Image (tube, rainbow, N blue to C red):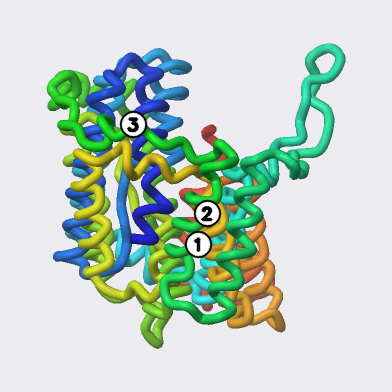
Amino acid sequence: MTTFMTMAYIIVVNPQILSETGMDQSSLITATILASMIATLIMAFYAKLPFGLAPGMGINAFFAYTIVLQMGFSWQLALTAVFLEGIIFLLLTFFNIREAIVNSIPINIKHAVSVGIGLFIALIGLNSANIVVTGMEAGSGGALTGNIVKMGNISSPTVLTALTGLVITAVLLALRIKGALLIGILLTTIIGIPFGVTQLPGTSKLVSLPPSIEPLFFKIRPGEIFSTNMLVVLFTLLFVDMFSAVGTLVGVGTKAGMLDKKGRLPRAKQALFSDAAGTTFGSLLGTSTVTTYVESAAGIAEGGRTGLTALVIAVLFGLALFLSPLFLIIPEAATAPALVLVGFFMITPIKEINFNDYTEAFPAFLTIVIMPLTYSIAEGVVFGIISYVLLKVFTNRGKEVSLLIYILAVVFILRFIIQ
């Protein structure tokens, strides 16, 4: 339940973003929920892991603002690219290529991914509650001035509600009260009512039939699969989602103590199949790439360790089809404290990093800092892998690097060159 509440914002945010392309916003609500539910059910029964899945943030913005609005392609072509991405991921998963990538990542970078995701989650939480905001402002001549980020308006109702919730939830955790994060979310939601932060819907709006997905269903265009435009769009989608999903699984799995003695995530293949299948189904329903959610760490922090956690998330998504106004009254100010505290939990593997070996420690450091600073899990993995290979090679320790990591490093470098 905690995981669902921390990721339920996607029910509103994903339709808002994708509707900028001309897609029907009401239909997008249904498509978002169905895609999330299907993918998470596969995670529950096939992978048996406690991860929630939904259309990914960041990748949906790339879908709408870059592919459609900036590059000028139709949303139907973009959905076709997402469909092809899902099929390719299914094939890569079937032939164990994605699992091999997960398992090949050096153990110190795996620990660093968890830490980097922790800082990333905390930044998301602080920003969503307006505790930390962008500090860049347009100066004379249109030039941007100021700090990259700065403190928000502490006296605003949203910030005060979030800070109050943060203190309450931290106290509950310190007292070792079971379900502290979930209780904190609910109490903060209640506290937000007199502040006007929590908006209560009318009782007549609590239950409703889901909008039809007919305007979006099966709108892919097979005739454009072999076009040059498709290759450009598809390559970018594949890259961003591949290493975002891998980074999330590794980071959250590391923190949850799910890795075996060799640093491998059990049932990684099944987990990767879940997001590949979710992406394929999601494109047919009419939404962007489905991926494993980093907010899953919130439920894992509460003790979720099995597919039962994912099953509950999927069931709640199903209920949201008919009770979305009830779930959507939970404001970002109420979920922000949970995300900040989950970020705190996620940084604990930093003590497992070997800081005595600079060829291990510096790549881990880059992985950690790049994730929150670029707002991208994938970029953190990229910088970590490239720096790891370069340091090992230039210190005559290249034999410690696996062939697959060499290949990944070359691919990452080529990506920067051809951008």
Lower sequence index among marks 2 and 3: 2
Q: Position of residue 161 (x, y in %)?
A: 61, 49
Left or right of residue 374, residue 83 in this image: left
Q: Cα distance, mark 2 to mark 3?
A: 20 Å
Numbered circle sitting on residue 225: none
> Badge 1 local density, few (<14 within 10 Å), some, or many (20+)?
many
> Badge 3 local density, few (<14 within 10 Å), some, or many (20+)?
few
> Which of 191 and 171 lies nearest the eye of the viewer?
191
> Which of 61 and 299 lies nearest the eye of the viewer?
299
Q: Cα distance, mark 1 to mark 2?
A: 6 Å
Numbered circle sitting on residue 202: 3
- Quadrant for the C terminus in the image: top right
Left or right of residue 71, residue 345 in this image: right
Answer whether residue 92 is visible to the viewer in this image. no
Label 1 close to label 2 by CB (< 8 Å): yes
Question: Of discs 3 and 1, which sits in the foreground?
Answer: 3
Question: Residue under circle 2?
Answer: 188
Determine whether 76 is above or below 151 in the image: above
**Secondary element type, mark 3:** loop
Numbered circle sitting on residue 184: 1
Taking the spot 54% from the left edge, 74% from the top edge, the residue there is 173
- Quadrant for the N terminus in the image: bottom left
Which residue type carries mark 1?
A: Gly
Left or right of residue 402, residue 333 in this image: right
